[in-house]
Amino acid sequence: QRLLLHGLLAAAGAVMTLGVLVVFVLQRNVWVATQAEFLNRVASAQNVLTDAMESAQSAAVLTAANQEVVGALANKDIETLTAASKLLYKSNPAIRRVVIISAGGEGVSLYPYGTFDLENYAFREYFIQARDTKAPYISDIFRAAVDNASRSVSVVAVPMFTPKGVFTGVLALSMDLD
């Protein structure tokens, strides 16, 4: 009887061990599948964000090169700047704000309408990079304080020049990531 009891206990222990092993394998497979799904979603989101940024940058480059817009910035022609900003804004749903900044860093035009929370943007990395490199610049993600609301954004900044190559300012597109 003892041998039978020991045999039954050993068999029960083996069945329990096998059960624990099956649960472990199932949990591991679920974790691997969940991780793969998460990585696919991250890659998909990255593709969507990259496409939105590239599209916004292309539109901003064309607008910044438009000499009518450059002249409007030099003359502080808010009506023309607003019309150009509105076209940009409507071209890409990820654009949260279009800001046209003078060569000295002062905000000249803001669309859609709101308040300039800063008097001068010349210290912003996106302004400095666009001005100094004379090339479009995409910022890192940062917390922007526009209309006194903190949002995660990235900025596409494009320098603006006269036909003679004189720097007149920066066209900045705030891309809302929230």
Image (tube, grey):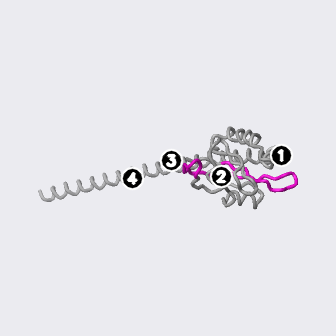
22 or 148, nearer to the observer: 148
SS of the residue at dot 2?
Answer: strand
Q: Which residues are magenta?
A: 145-173
Residues under numbered marks 2 and 4 in contact, where contact means CB atoms less than 8 Å apart: no
Tally the marks. 4
Residue that carries the numbered disc 3 in the rendered image = 37
Residue that carries the numbered disc 4 in the rendered image = 25
Amino acid type, label 3? Glu
Residue that carries the numbered disc 1 in the rendered image = 67
User: Crowding near pointer 1: few (<14 within 10 Å), some, many (20+)?
Assistant: some
Residues under numbered marks 2 and 1 in contact, where contact means CB atoms less than 8 Å apart: no
Residue that carries the numbered disc 2 in the rendered image = 155
Instruction: Indicate left or right for 141 with 59 as reference.
Output: left
Residues at marks 2 and 1, CA–CA distance in whole angstroms? 22 Å
Instruction: Indicate left or right for 20 with 89 as reference.
Output: left
Q: Residue at x 79, y 54 (%)?
A: 168
Amino acid type, label 4? Val
Residue 96 appears at what percent x and percent y? 62, 44
Residues at marks 1 and 3, CA–CA distance in whole angstroms? 47 Å
Q: Residue at x 66, y 55 (%)?
A: 119
Residues at marks 1 and 4, CA–CA distance in whole angstroms? 65 Å
Q: Main secondary structure of the magenta part?
A: strand
10 or 83, nearer to the observer: 83
SS of the residue at dot 4?
Answer: helix
Residues under numbered marks 4 and 3 in contact, where contact means CB atoms less than 8 Å apart: no
Q: Is residue 96 above or below residue 8?
A: above
Can you tell which quarter of the image residue 130 is in? bottom right
Please tell me whether mark 1 or mark 4 is closer to you in this view: 1
